[in-house]
Amino acid sequence: TTQVWQLDPSQPDAQIIEKAAAIIKNGGLVAFPTETVYGLGAHGLSGEAVAKIYRAKGRPSDNPLILHVAEIPMAVSLSRDLPTTAQLLMKTFWPGPLTLVVPRAAAIPREVTGGLDTVAIRMPAHPVALALIKAAGVPIAAPSANKSGRPSPTTADHVKADLTGRVDALLDAGPAGVGLESTVLDLTGAVPIILRPGGVTYEQLQQVIPEVIIDPSVLGKKLPANEAPRSPGMKYRHYAPTAPVILFTGATTKVKEQLAARYRELTSQGKRVGILAAEENIPFYPADAIVLPLGTRENPAMAAASLFALLRQFEQLQVDTILAEGLDTQGLGLAVMNRLQRAASEVVGC
Ligand code: TXA
Ligand code: MG
């Protein structure tokens, strides 16, 4: 069974944190909030403890995990050769939603790195996460706390739905803030590469490292069959809600028209269709349609905060298909579009 502990997100109860940290130290699993999404944590230097994460999630074991730290010296100890850019980025963006891929130290178990020679590290900006890591005294390996292939959890209820009985404890401190996972930045090559866009934006990174580039797979460019993806996570279709997502991209007027046309076509076939639309576009669609608001076009932060919860809501509404409007890729819009692309079974360019 899973013990659920409620915590004040800004002032976590020290006794509860101690109990949760003891579970981590003893090789158990604790789900905990971060500022991005909920994580599923285990002792990051114990291969045996980390192996339990894969079992609980049903995750392929070649997809490596992020090590979460509470202090910069802990991060330094996890890399055999920390690039100078890494130090600069840590000072600028940590604690925060930025994960750095760097050469790994020998002590890191292969269960964490999936056999790679690199390791992903981040310092989360959530008082509960930081307190838990400090109390455990070790880096905490943690993927998002969802069943593999499901949308990442932004509330404790999402974690319960996916992992009850599969983790020892769940720290419930209310909804996560950003709502999408951290930015994953590869620092092991000549040029820093964004492998996964997230809470720290491309524009923010450019201010500090002007040469940063975005991996072409981020916006759905297919890799040639003989080329291995840089981040193993990129080869799996993620966030696959039960109903297929059809994503419409391009100019808003055309997106609305083509989406509405597909809506009429599918409903006339007797399908139950959900629509994910910018608030200001909702009046355009039929009044009896199931439409959920993905923020406003001006504010991708709202879309980021609500996307995963909305995908789960569509499941509860038992729709057969989700028709989604695309967003501009500025700022957090890039991360939202990346998640929509990866959830989509079809992308319609309008
Ligand atoms: O916000 C987040 O990052 C959340 C919270 C819990 O911290 N965690 C998270 O973990 O999203 P996960 O396991 O769902 O995603 C980690 C991503 C995967 O795409 C994985 O392939 C990539 O990071 N990754 C991990 N280690 C890597 C490495 N050594 N090289 C390249 N990519 C790596
Ligand atoms: Mg995940």
Image: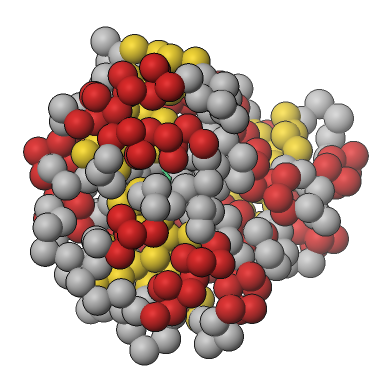
Res. 55 in view: no
**Quarter of the picture for ligand 1?**
bottom left
**146 in relation to 298, above or below:** above
- Which residue is at a point 27% across and 19% down the rendered structure image? 168
Q: Which of the image's four quarters has the C terminus?
A: bottom right
- Which residue is at a point 25% across and 55% down the rendered structure image? 64
**59 in relation to 212, above or below:** above
Q: Which of the image's four quarters has the N terminus?
A: top left
Q: State the residue in front, 323 or 166.
A: 166
Relative horizontal placement of residue 97, taking residue 117 as reference (left or right): right
Q: How is the image coloured?
A: secondary structure
**89 in relation to 7, above or below:** below
**Residue 172 locus on image (x, y percent):** 49, 21
Q: State the residue in front, 105 or 54.
A: 105
Relative horizontal placement of residue 191, taking residue 337 as reference (left or right): left
**Residue 309 falls in image quadrant:** top right
Res. 304 in view: yes
**Residue 115 locus on image (x, y percent):** 13, 61
Relative horizontal placement of residue 7, taking residue 249 as reference (left or right): left
**Residue 112 locus on image (x, y percent):** 20, 52
- Which residue is at a point 30% across and 70% down the rendered structure image? 102
- Which residue is at a point 24% across and 76% down the rendered structure image? 81
**151 in relation to 68, above or below:** above
**Residue 54 falls in image quadrant:** top left
Q: State the residue in front, 167 or 103.
A: 103
**Residue 239 locus on image (x, y percent):** 45, 44
Q: State the residue in front, 308 or 241.
A: 308
Q: How many marks?
A: 0
Relative horizontal placement of residue 88, taking residue 300 as reference (left or right): left
**Residue 316 falls in image quadrant:** top right
